[in-house]
Image (cartoon, rainbow, N blue to C red):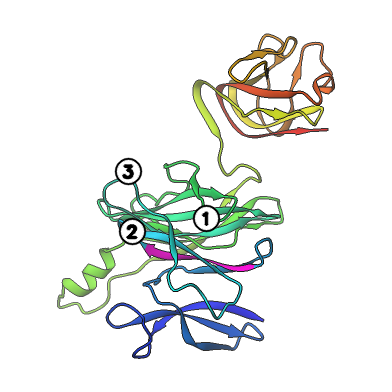
Amino acid sequence: RYKAFIWDKATPGSGAVGRPSYGLYGVVSADGYHWKRLPDILLADFHDTQNIAYWDAEKRKYVAYLRGAQNGRAISYAETTDFKKWPDRAEVILHPGSLDAPFDDYYTNGFTRYPGEPALKLIFSSIYHHASDLVDVRFGITHNGRAINWVSYEPILEAGRSGDPDAGGVFTGPNMVRLPDGTLALPYRGMGYTHNEWYYTQYYEPSADTREPPRTVMFAWAIWDDGRLAGIEADNLGEFWTRNEKLEGTQLLLNARTTRSGSVEVELWEPVSRRISRPIPGFTFADCVPTHGDAAWTRMTWKGKADLSELKGRTVQLRVRLNSAKIFGYRLAD
């Protein structure tokens, strides 16, 4: 009934790698309390940290996100219809590249799915920075499970300040949940020591005091408002465009936050050819009633327009202008 991975020492001749040899085994349980290790190695590569598997109801397959290696540690992927039979090698799908610092590793994957939206798959990868010996968390998104895009290269969860119980680094766990108050919560582990600080102090600096140095560890929730994991922000003035889409709804709703003096305005454009678009009269910035404050799903209006019903069925593009504001999303709805 229950299945999981375990990283364990391998028996001789099993094909596992490393010295001593280890491998990724499957463990199964009927009740979630008593577990039995399957005899054969499922994956023989060096998948030693945070290997997450789940049953993908859409693909009708078991899917795994694993620790891999390419230009340093990386994130690997594997899938199978039979939990006892996995591919010989997992596929590296995300690894450090030219936009990363020279000595960054993608340490763990932190895979989870958005609560209530299982098709929306999220990565909260812990990034190990060799230069500083610190670990922070970066946020990525995928729809097909394999092609992952970083929402930003900036961390979504940072290590704490000196003296904090998570000053050395943060590692997220899987399975984001929705708390009773509607907020989103992701478990994470914080370390008060840097990645190598405890290890080298313990093993390479012997002293008369044989006690182990303290390993301060904390467990906590990282919490966001629903629908506000990330957004497009302008500290001063900025704007962006959406893609073209057919207008099916009669209301444009914005999930946005502004400062007390900030605002968000929207102008609607319509393509007239493959290369040329033009603003739609009556729905320009000059007609828009700006929105202010902090509210999820505020209805946008334009002077003299009760709704978007006169445009329903037409292809439109949104031009969004931000003044000291952040927008998390928009909806076209009835």
Report the span colored magenta: 61-68
Q: Is residue 16 above or below residue 109?
A: below
Q: Main SS of the magenta segment?
A: strand
Residue type at numbered disc 2: Gln
Residue type at numbered disc 3: Ser
Q: Is residue 31 above or below residue 309?
A: below
Q: In the image, is residue 62 part of the stretch drawn in magenta?
A: yes
Q: Position of residue 263 (x, y in %)?
A: 62, 21
Q: Note whether residue 179 is visible.
A: yes
**To which residue does mark 2 refer?**
70
Question: Which SS class for mark 2?
Answer: loop
Q: Quadrant of the N terminus?
A: bottom right
Question: Which SS class for mark 1?
Answer: loop
Point out the residue furthest to the front here: 274
Left or right for 168, reference 181: left
Taking the spot 67% from the left edge, 15% from the top edge, the residue there is: 272
Q: Quadrant of the C terminus?
A: top right
Residue 262, quarter of the rendered image: top right
**To which residue does mark 3 refer?**
98
**Of the pair 303 and 296, the residue shown nearer to us:** 303
Taking the spot 55% from the left edge, 77% from the top edge, the residue there is: 4
